[in-house]
Image (cartoon, helix red, strand yellow):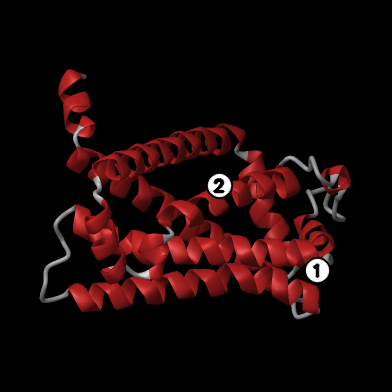
Amino acid sequence: MNSIRKVFGTAVGKKCGMALTGVFLFLFVVGHMVGNLQVFLGQYAINHYAQLLQSNTGVLWSLRICLAAVALTHIYFAITLTLENRAKREVGYEVKELVGASLASRTMFISGSVIFGFIVYHLLHFTTGTTNPEFMTFKDERGWHDVYRMVQTGFSNGWVVAAYVVGVGALGLHLSNGLRAFCQSLGWRFETYASRIDRAAVIVAVVLFVGFAIVPLALFLGGAK
């Protein structure tokens, strides 16, 4: 236990910890996007997918607890590294660093904060139904939770759609630098392939942004089944 604390107590250890927790969250994001896209297959597909998740309560809650723990650990590493970097950084070095830094890398803390706020709203909106209690009462003809009707109703409001697009936009911006930083933290970002890795990170981030944003936009504009 002490050896683990020593490793993750160093700046390098914290960066590796943030990278490893980040890749777990990235895989969840990809899976979540794939699940969301089933709305384009119609009511039965998305409701059946939700029913499978909700009927396996033990697995679902284990995943939720694990996901929350990983997310909080990721946030902890991010905050401590940010504070440590600010404490060590001199003014001249900071100006030099910002000149060569990308928008995504300069705004990692901001985009992360926006993502956190978005996740809280998303959970209150669709998971717990706190903002819209009627969502939890929607049932389809099979007696399953009518997720299709829920998201259609939820994304009929333009302000809600805008909030989701901004949220997933922050996610895409965060990932475009996070994926690059992941490779760098683990020593995989070799100079020869650095530019390719950076481009691949941007492409993946854009794909994820489109994959998430297309659902609220399509439902708002009436493009889904």
The residue indicated by pointer 2 is: 116
Q: From the viewer's perspective, is 46 left or right of 203?
A: right
Residue extending furthest front? 92
Give the residue type at disc 2.
Phe
Of the image marks 1 and 2, the number of the one nearer the N terminus: 2
Asked if residue 55 is positioned above or below residue 58 in the image, the reply reads below
Tag 2 secondary structure: helix
Residue 124 marker: none
Res. 34 in view: no
Q: Which residue is mark 1?
A: 158
Q: Secondary structure at mark 1?
A: helix
Q: Position of residue 89 (x, y in %)?
A: 25, 47
Displayed quadrant of residue 2: top left
Q: Residues within 10 Å of mark 1 (few under 14, many from 20)?
A: some
Do tag 1 and tag 2 residues touch (Cβ < 8 Å)? no
Q: Closest to the observer: 33 or 217?
A: 217
x, y percent for residue 214: 64, 74
In this image, 139 relative to 182: left or right?
Answer: right
The percent coordinates of residue 65 (x first, y second) are 51, 32
State the separation of the CA atoms marked 1 and 2.
21 Å
3 or 133, nearer to the observer = 3
Left or right: where 58 falls relative to 44: left
Horizontally, residue 110 falls left or right of residue 155, namely left
Residue at the spot x=73%, y=49% of the render?
126
User: Where in the figure is residue 32, as x and y percent of width and height?
Assistant: 54, 57
Identity, as a three-letter code, of the amino acid under mark 1: Gly
Q: Quadrant of residue 96 in the image? A: bottom left
Image quadrant where one finds the N terminus: top left
- The answer to which of 26 and 91 lies nearer the viewer is 91
Q: Quadrant of the C terminus?
A: bottom right
